[in-house]
Amino acid sequence: MTMDFETARFNMVEQQIRTWEVLDANVLEACSKVHRERFVPDAYRQLAFSDTAIELGHGQAMMQPKIEARLLQALDVRRADRVLEIGTGSGYLTALLASLAAHVTSIEIFDDLSARAKHNLRNANIGNVALHVGNAVDGWSTAEPYDVIVVTGSSPERRALIEQQLSLNGRMFIVVGNAPVMEALLITRIAKDSWSVESLFETELAPLIGAECKPEFQF
């Protein structure tokens, strides 16, 4: 039986995303237009619109659709924004960001995931994205400052070196803490040496490679 992706996408927006207090018209339009099923590994395509994380390999996963939409709404991505995404994954969130912003620089530590995301984005005719393979645990300074930064892996604590790469009034999404209690934060640079922090919601996310909590020594 062939899945009706158009209906499934509509239901995802109406039943998952809207009901999680995502009402921004631009975000809803992006989630309606970008074909999520094209960014999901073939083995999980039937789960493309489910309220669940989807495995990508290397211990990485696509976030739940409602989390992706909620973080986009919080970041208030604008047409002129330059975006840094740390953790490309499947390229789906990259595509959503690119549909809202001027340009997205996306970094992925695993070269096979980056190659797959490049393929997915090309098939979706999305061109305002630069993909790089590398370790961006402390950001990606070559194209800074950024108006928006999205960290798609969790960190035990805030990452000051990444926050320094925000432009004035730039916004950053990051999930901090240790499982099972993690907190999604919106961090805004309000002055050269000052940031505001807003707690968005609780969630659980795989650690950013290189930012994992170090084991404590027992004496």
Image (cartoon, rainbow, N blue to C red):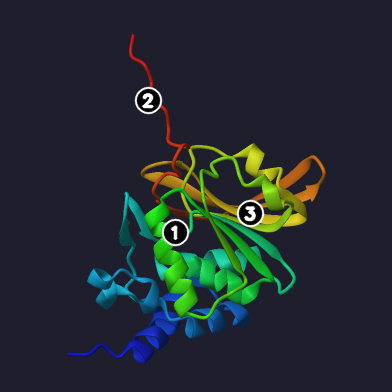
- Residue for point 33% across, 14% down: 218
**Viewer can see residue 91:** no
Dot 1 lies on which element? helix
> Could you give the CA–CA distance between mark 3 and mark 2, rounded to whole angstroms?
27 Å
Residue 136 vertical position relative to residue 123 in the rendered view, above or below: above
Residue 81 vertical position relative to residue 181 in the rendered view, above or below: below
Which label's residue is closer to the chain start, 1 or 2? 1
Amino acid tagged 1:
Ser
Amino acid tagged 3:
Met
Amino acid tagged 2:
Pro
Numbered circles on residues, count: 3
Dot 2 lies on which element? loop
The residue pinned by badge 2 equals 215
The residue pinned by badge 1 equals 114
> Could you give the CA–CA distance between mark 1 and mark 2, rounded to whole angstroms?
29 Å
- Whole-percent x, y for residue 204 in the image: 40, 51
**Viewer can see residue 15:** yes
- Whole-percent x, y for residue 10 in the image: 41, 87
Location of the N terminus by quadrant is bottom left
Q: Nearer the viewer, mark 1 or mark 2?
A: 1
Dot 3 lies on which element? strand
- Residue for point 44% across, 65% down: 117
The residue pinned by badge 3 equals 172
Q: How crowded is mark 3: few (under 14 residues within 10 Å), some or many (20 or more)?
A: many
Front residue of this view, candidates 208 and 112: 112
Which label's residue is closer to the chain start, 3 or 2? 3
- Toward which corner of the image does residue 30 lie, by quadrant? bottom right
